[in-house]
Image (cartoon, rainbow, N blue to C red):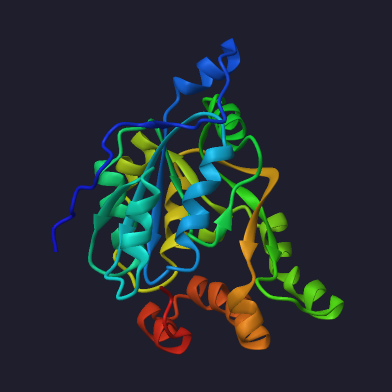
Amino acid sequence: MDPVTARRSKPWISPAADSSAQTQKNFDMLISTIIPVLNEEQLVVRCLRQFEAQPGGWELIVVDGGSTDATLNLAEKVGSARILTAPRGRGTQMNVGAASATGRIFLFLHSDVILPKGAHHLISKAMADPTAVAGAFRTWTVPEKPCGPVLAALLHLADLRSRYTSLPYGDQTMFVRAETFRQVGGFRQIPLMEDLDFSRRVRRLGRVQILRASVRVSGRRLQASLVRYTILMNLFPLLYRLRFPVRRLADFYGDPR
């Protein structure tokens, strides 16, 4: 289906911004934030409203993959983002969002992720290094519903990967120079591991910075099936590197959103 333009077409400046010279300098680097969604009515408003407390120049682009719940209506009511539609699939949706983005930096944000304070400054500083072509954050997984201390500790096993890997995953909220994104041809149309595949191709062009700051990632999938999801997160990347067919991995994984 063709992308559908939405209400806002101009870059959105967070009301948290001040008038200092440094903040104004940061405005000069517009960050296009692309958010792929599918049936995320419980999280899309929280995701978009986090930018009300994030100084800097942001262009917010929500790309819906065919939601059947209230996701689109809720996103439109927030009013801070341009809403597009695309065929279902994170890679496809993010490519559609990037095609309409106008910033010099593209940031790919999952709807269940919250950026750290001062994210615009952190990204701008990282991209001021001419040798860096892309970057990402560390992760800190938080429970969506109350859980005991043992389960809470287990949730953070997923965060270890973000501290030792040099190839960021999608939940680490990757950001990349617009020209680099176009140079590698964006995300490939594969059903799974599009983020790891993208990271590998981007790293061939320059340095990928993993920032020390962490994004807060919802533990909803881990809480729903901790053992299964932990195995998948650690085993599937290895199988992918060993060239196990991605279509078979997707069949085992289930709905990757």
User: Which corner quadrant of the image does residue 9 belong to?
Assistant: top left
Looking at the picture, tell me which residue is in the foreground, 99 or 52.
Answer: 52
Left or right of 256 in this view: 65: left
Where residue 254 appears, as percent x and y from the top left, is: 43, 85
Q: Quadrant of the N terminus?
A: bottom left
Give the residue drawn at x 49%, y 43%. Answer: 175
Residue extending farthest top: 21
Give the residue drawn at x 44%, y 20%. Answer: 28
Left or right of 72 in this view: 242: right
Looking at the picture, tell me which residue is in the foreground, 127 or 24.
Answer: 24
User: Which corner quadrant of the image does residue 2 belong to?
Assistant: bottom left
Residue extending farthest left: 2
Where residue 164 appears, as percent x and y from the top left, is: 71, 57
Left or right of 58 in this view: 222: right
Residue 91 appears in view:
no
Give the vertical position of 180 relative to 17 (above or below): below
Give the vertical position of 36 relative to 103 (above or below): below
Where residue 141 appears, as percent x and y from the top left, is: 69, 64
Looking at the picture, tell me which residue is in the foreground, 168 or 50.
Answer: 50
Residue extending farthest right: 149
Where residue 133 appears, as percent x and y from the top left, is: 48, 36
Q: What is the number of callouts on the image?
A: 0
Q: Quadrant of the C terminus?
A: bottom left
Residue 20 appears in view:
yes
